[in-house]
Image (cartoon, rainbow, N blue to C red):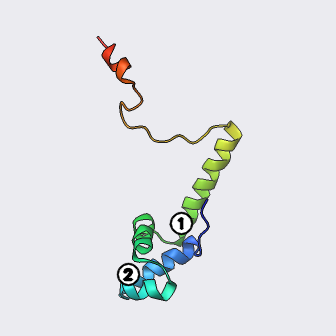
Amino acid sequence: MKWSRFTETQTVAILREADAGVAVTEVCSKYGVSGNTFYNWKKKYSGMGVPELKRMKELETENTIEGDVLGVEPREPCTEGAHLKSSDASDAP
């Protein structure tokens, strides 16, 4: 997993600072992040407070532990019908 300079709690605090009326460009330059990073954070953490963030982390940890115990590998989401080969589709009645 990629290392981050900011914890998720710090990220939420930075987003709230921008929500309080400080210009996004000013916030980005103050913390040394790009505008793209800021908007990615906003997409991921918008409307989330510290309690919700802690609950999300607990659930992620719980899911990881359960997957390890059960020996289940995480699956990639599959689009409908993408798993079928073209030959499988032609065999259909």
The residue depicted at 35 percent of the width and 87 percent of the height is 21
Inspect the image, locate mark 1, and give the three-letter code of the amino acid beneath it.
Answer: Leu
Three-letter amino acid code of the residue under disc 2:
Asp
Left or right position of 84 against 69: left
Q: Position of residue 24 (x, y in %)?
A: 37, 83
Please identify the quadrant where the C terminus is shown. top left
| Quadrant of residue 29 within the rendered picture | bottom left
Q: Pick the residue in front: 75 or 60.
A: 75
- Vertical relation: 36 (above or below) 1: below
Give the quadrant of residue 9: bottom right
When the figure is inspected, residue 20 is found, relative to residue 61, above or below; the finding is below
Q: Give the residue furthest to the left.
A: 93
Q: Position of residue 85 (x, y in %)?
A: 39, 24
Q: Secondary structure at mark 1?
A: helix
Could you tell whether 4 is left or right of 23 in the image? right
Q: Residue at x 48, y 88 (%)?
A: 30
Mark 2: secondary structure: helix
Q: 55 or 29, which lies in front? A: 29
Residue located 45% across and 72% down the image:
37
Which residue is the extreme one toward the front? 87
Q: Quadrant of residue 58?
A: bottom right
Q: Quadrant of the N terminus?
A: bottom right
**Residue pointed to by mark 2:** 19
Give residue 46's position: percent from left, percent from top.
Answer: 41, 69
Q: Which of the numbered marks, if any, corresponds to residue 53?
A: 1
Q: Residues within 10 Å of mark 1 (few under 14, many from 20)?
A: some
Q: Which residue of the protein is positioned furthest toward the top in this rendering?
A: 93
